[in-house]
Amino acid sequence: MTGGYWLGVDLGGTKILSALFDDNLRLLARSKQPTGADGGPAAVLERIAQGAEAVIHEAGIDRTQIRGMGLGIPGQIAIGTSTVKFAPNLDWHDVDVQSLLPANWTWPVYLENDVRMGTYGEFAFGAARGARNVLGVFVGTGVGGGLILNGELFTGFNGNAGEFGNLVIHWRRGHTVEAIAGRKFMMQRAGEILADSPKRVRKEWKNVDLDGVRSSQLAEFYQRDDPVAVQLVDDSARALGAAIGGIVNFISPEVIVLGGGVTGALGDSYIERIWEIARRYTLPGAADNIRCIAASLGDDSGVVGCAAYAKFRSQLRAVVA
């Protein structure tokens, strides 16, 4: 299957990124829309359609040449279907996406978890290109993950493999990685710490809306050695490192790719700290020659992964047929 074009759409809690690629997966056009999840699934899917049509129009291609589309969803997909079982940031439950897409779309649409698609993008064209076994960890509002095993996206028996953020790392309290390392939960913790902090510390956070803190703001506080931010970031790195160390022992990935808004804002020192902690939990020699590196595609990890995955699935379907 050659000579066509591929769509990649990355649906997030606040924005929708859409992109069109040629058959060599070169970017031709991209578009951004607000998610507007308050309008419900139908309104969100309408904006997804608008974004896709926008990049088709910008590239000036004949829509009949589109071979497929990958759609990254921030939630759980019922394996082998177009149904989103649960997407917490969108408040979706059992939403059949295919039924809400334009009837005149003749190309196949492949749904997958958004972080898996980010991992696939880094595997296919980013920081992990050329590797066969990859762990992707994306730290943003929450924490997500993806697994490439033996050169293929691994989803597991029930389709939930790679849910890194839901690993429990404190068995007595039931704390997950996400509950410590995700920005949303870090800000909840910030409120608890500030309530018992000296006045000079509270003053630095005065008038800061903790619910609206961006990754870049957290990084600014951290870079000026604010004690609250330092504690939050170090706890985050420790939680991620402990979990990654366990994964290294369990599946021995060749490359660990760290991405997401928090990782991007905090930079290399954050990644180095995570890997330093991770190595403390690995068996002797288990971490040798493993690379723990930053994602290289930035915001485009997801759309690149979606388009690449759509091409892979379409080619696989053609072979089977």
Image (cartoon, rainbow, N blue to C red):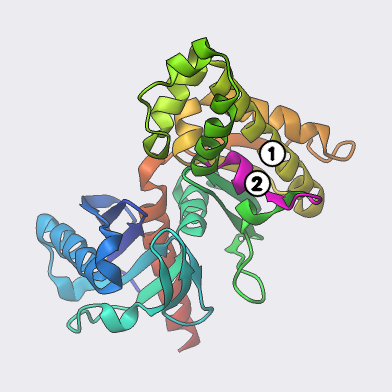
From the top left corner, tell me how far across and down residue 105 is, in percent.
Answer: 21, 79
Q: Residues within 10 Å of mark 1 (few under 14, many from 20)?
A: many
**Which is more N-terminal, label 2 or label 1?**
2
Q: Is residue 224 visible?
A: yes
**In the drawing, does residue 143 fall left or right of residue 94?**
right
State whether residue 317 is above or below residue 139.
Answer: below
The quarter of the picture where residue 182 lies is top right
| Marks 1 and 2, how far apart at CA | 6 Å
Residue 159 has which mark?
none
The answer to whether 90 appears left or right of 273 in the picture is left
Q: Say which amino acid is labelled 1.
A: Ala
Q: Nearer the viewer, residue 53 or 281?
A: 281
Viewer-side residue, 238 vs 138: 238
The answer to whether mark 1 and mark 2 are in CB contact below 8 A is yes
Residue identified by numbered label 1: 239
Q: Which residues are magenta?
A: 171-182
Quarter of the figure with residue 278: top right
Query: Crowdedness of circle 2 by 10 Å Cα count: few (<14), some, many (20+)?
Result: many
- Which residue is more in the foreground, 267 or 180? 180
Q: Which residue is mark 2?
A: 177
Above or below 256: residue 198: above
Quarter of the figure that contains the N terminus: bottom left
Coordinates of residue 298 in the picture (x, y in percent): 40, 39
**Which residue: 40% across, 73% down?**
110
- Percent coordinates x, y for residue 162 in the rendering: 62, 59
Q: Is label 2 in a helix, a strand or a loop?
A: loop
Left or right of 145: which side holds 72? left
Instruction: Determine if the magenta segment contains residue 180.
Output: yes
Residue 139 x %, y %: 52, 42
Which amino acid, mark 2? Val
- Residue at position x 28%, y 62% in the image: 38
Q: Is residue 260 covered in magenta?
A: no
